[in-house]
Image: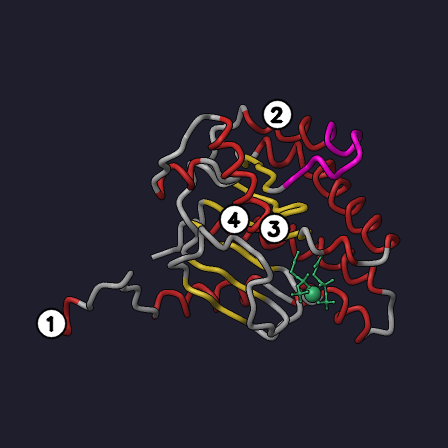
Amino acid sequence: MIPWHVAIIMDGNGRWAIKQSLPRVFGHKRGMETVKTIIQVAKSIGIKILTLYAFSTENWKRPKIEIDSLLSLLIQFLQDETSKFIKTGIRLRILGDLSKFPQYIRNELNKICKLMSKNTPHFELNIALNYGARQELVHAFKEMLKHGIDDPTEQTISSFLYTAGQPDPDLVIRTSGEFRISNFLLWQIAYSEIYVTSKLWPDFTENDLKAAISEFQKRERRFGGVNINNK
Ligand code: IPE
Ligand code: IPE
Ligand code: MG
């Protein structure tokens, strides 16, 4: 049983670079290589939706030079991969508040998403960019008010999130050994399985993803119920 939706908090780029006595930016650069590998592996093993946490609403606290190079690495990556994504049936969705980005970045992201929107999605890639779960919920509530919705159900709220229409993550993976969520998908991970590995993101490999999945396969998901075998 392969998890349908896997979400990853890609953490540890900075520590990876520092371990090699390199500036943090080199960790982000190396981390992008891991992103490429993991997208292909996820797709080939049958994951249907992969959500990658790339930049949080709190990451603006970092030095401008780090933010600038992180964002340009991301844009560069998307530009480089667009044609491959189109060929291989990948659909891209950006989760987050793009209004904070300069117009040229927004245009570029819109262009890339539009090109891929014609794809029959064999695989959906979500990139969380200037994403914060609390910001997402505030945004959703404001949108509901605008639509005159004053008695929302859980389904209504889900349908106003950036992940609208997608099933919730089955598995959340966090690299670099931190046992925290850092404002990631708070609503959507209500019943996700969580897997933490001490591997730093640039060192995370195909085998590490497979290890996370095989651990997931051993978990017993009860969703608040009971195991029918223990009745
Ligand atoms: C993850 O690596 C990438 C982003 C958060 C953008 P970090 O940059 O957080 O790396 P550490 O946690 O400092 O090692
Ligand atoms: C979480 O990592 C955000 C991303 C991976 C984009 P952080 O490095 O920002 O999280 P904290 O600060 O350790 O909680
Ligand atoms: Mg970090």
Magenta region: which residues? 97-108
Residue 198: percent from the left, percent from the top? Answer: 60, 75
Q: Which residue is mark 4?
A: 50
Task: Answer with the quadrant where ligand 1 appears in the image.
Answer: bottom right
Of circles 3 and 1, which is in front?
3
Magenta region, mostly helix, strand or loop?
helix
Disc 1, ligand 2: is the CB inside 8 Å? no
Mark 2, Cα crowd under 10 Å, few <14 / some 14-19 / many 20+, is some
Q: Is residue 164 left or right of residue 20?
A: left
Q: Which residue is mark 3?
A: 132
Disc 4 secondary structure class: strand
Give the Cα distance between marks 3 and 1: 40 Å
Looking at the image, the residue that sits furthest to the front is: 150
Mark 4, Cα crowd under 10 Å, few <14 / some 14-19 / many 20+, is many
Q: Earlier in the sequence, mark 1 or mark 2?
A: 2
Question: Label 1 sits on what residue type?
Answer: Lys
Q: Which residue is mark 1?
A: 231
Disc 2 secondary structure class: helix
Question: Label 4 sits on what residue type?
Answer: Leu
Which of 182/6 is in front?
182
Q: Earlier in the sequence, mark 2 or mark 3?
A: 2
Quadrant that contains the N terminus? bottom left
Q: Which residue is mark 2?
A: 114
Q: Earlier in the sequence, mark 1 or mark 4?
A: 4
Of circles 1 and 2, which is in front?
1
Q: Is residue 22 left or right of residue 128?
A: right
